[in-house]
Image (spheres, rainbow, N blue to C red):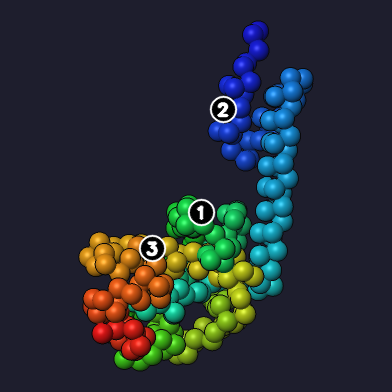
């Protein structure tokens, strides 16, 4: 049988999913061509990284394992406390006990493309997902901390399953009867909170891109409402939009 060209093997390697790499290596490990052996080295490095990621994810399940007596453990996180414009958004996620999703992390540590990819996986595999949003007017009315709590309560209410335990990123949510465990920097320590941070971040980012189409002068698609130099310059030039937080922009608007 005619040997495959190295270029064909390389293309096959790049198309091979991580879970199929062992089989791919076995297929070509006896091909002694230098180009193929280099590809096998690359495949073995990918496998090593995969095993390291699996180990990291197992560590990220520390709190979920500690409270394994609860059937429905919900991670809670928010995005958007600091921006000058747009809503604050909270995510609530109940993952299955045998969750196999890799690369979940604090959403700030992930690229936009990886967040989008993980968003789809979480929405597909989660037991339940709830999203809460509180807009600028309410933020101005009750302050950002209370608005954050309100968004979190809304996210919990929107879950299709009632959680038995809440793992929260740093806070204890008032007016919630469910047992809560606040975890400092929880989005990097709990897989459930990390998943919630991704859901909240992607949801809010998509909203800000939509707002950019309505008010393009502020650059919402790129700055997501945060106070970049360009955003502040636009505020001074054009004044606030309807989605700016009046209590946040007193020093910047006309």
Per the image, the residue denoted by label 1 is: 114
Disc nearer the start of the sequence (1/2): 2
Label 1 residue SS: helix
Disc nearer the start of the sequence (3/2): 2
Per the image, the residue denoted by label 2 is: 11
Label 3 residue SS: helix
* Residue 199, image x, y percentages: 45, 64
Taking depth in this image into account, of 161 and 148 the one nearest to the observer is 148
* Residue 239, image x, y percentages: 24, 79
Looking at the image, which residue is at 22% across and 65% down?
Answer: 214
Label 2 residue SS: helix
Give the answer, above or below, for where 46 lies relative to 201. above
Looking at the image, which residue is at 66% across and 65% down?
Answer: 60
Looking at the image, which residue is at 77% across and 20% down?
Answer: 32
**What's the distance in space between the residues labelled 3 and 2, CA to CA?**
34 Å
Residue 40 is at least partly visible in this image: yes
Per the image, the residue denoted by label 3 is: 222
Taking depth in this image into account, of 169 and 242 the one nearest to the observer is 242
Disc nearer the start of the sequence (1/3): 1
Taking depth in this image into account, of 182 and 139 the one nearest to the observer is 139
**What's the distance in space between the residues labelled 1 and 3, CA to CA?**
17 Å
Residue 124 is at least partly visible in this image: no
Closer to us: mark 1 or mark 3? 3
The reply to whether discs 3 and 2 touch (Cβ–Cβ < 8 Å) is no
**What's the distance in space between the residues labelled 1 and 2, CA to CA?**
22 Å
- Crowding at mark 2 (Cα within 10 Å: few <14, some 14-19, many 20+): few
Looking at the image, which residue is at 50% across and 68% down?
Answer: 197
* Residue 225, image x, y percentages: 37, 72
């Amino acid at each position: 049988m005619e040997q495959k060209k190295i270029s064909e093997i390389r293309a096959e390697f790049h198309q091979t999913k991580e879970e199929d790499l062992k089989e791919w290596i076995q297929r070509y490990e006896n091909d002694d061509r230098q180009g193929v052996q280099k590809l096998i080295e690359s495949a073995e490095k990918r496998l090593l990284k995969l095993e390291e990621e699996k180990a990291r994810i197992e560590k990220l399940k520390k709190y979920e394992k500690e409270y394994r007596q609860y059937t429905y453990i919900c991670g809670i996180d928010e995005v958007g406390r600091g921006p000058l414009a747009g809503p604050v958004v909270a995510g609530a996620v109940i993952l299955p006990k045998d969750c196999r999703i890799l690369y979940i992390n604090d959403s700030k540590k992930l690229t936009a493309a990886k967040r989008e990819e993980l968003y789809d996986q979480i929405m597909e595999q989660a037991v339940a997902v709830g999203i809460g949003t509180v807009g600028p007017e309410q933020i101005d009315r009750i302050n950002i901390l209370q608005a954050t709590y309100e968004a979190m309560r809304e996210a919990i209410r929107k879950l299709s399953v009632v959680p038995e335990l809440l793992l929260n990123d740093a806070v204890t949510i008032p007016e919630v009867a469910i047992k809560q465990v606040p975890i400092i920097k929880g989005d990097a320590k709990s897989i459930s909170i990390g998943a919630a941070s991704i859901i909240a971040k992607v949801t809010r980012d998509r909203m800000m891109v939509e707002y950019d189409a309505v008010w393009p002068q502020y650059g919402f698609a790129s700055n997501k409402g945060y106070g970049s130099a360009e955003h502040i310059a636009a505020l001074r030039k054009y004044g606030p939009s309807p989605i700016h937080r009046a209590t946040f922009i007193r020093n910047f608007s006309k």
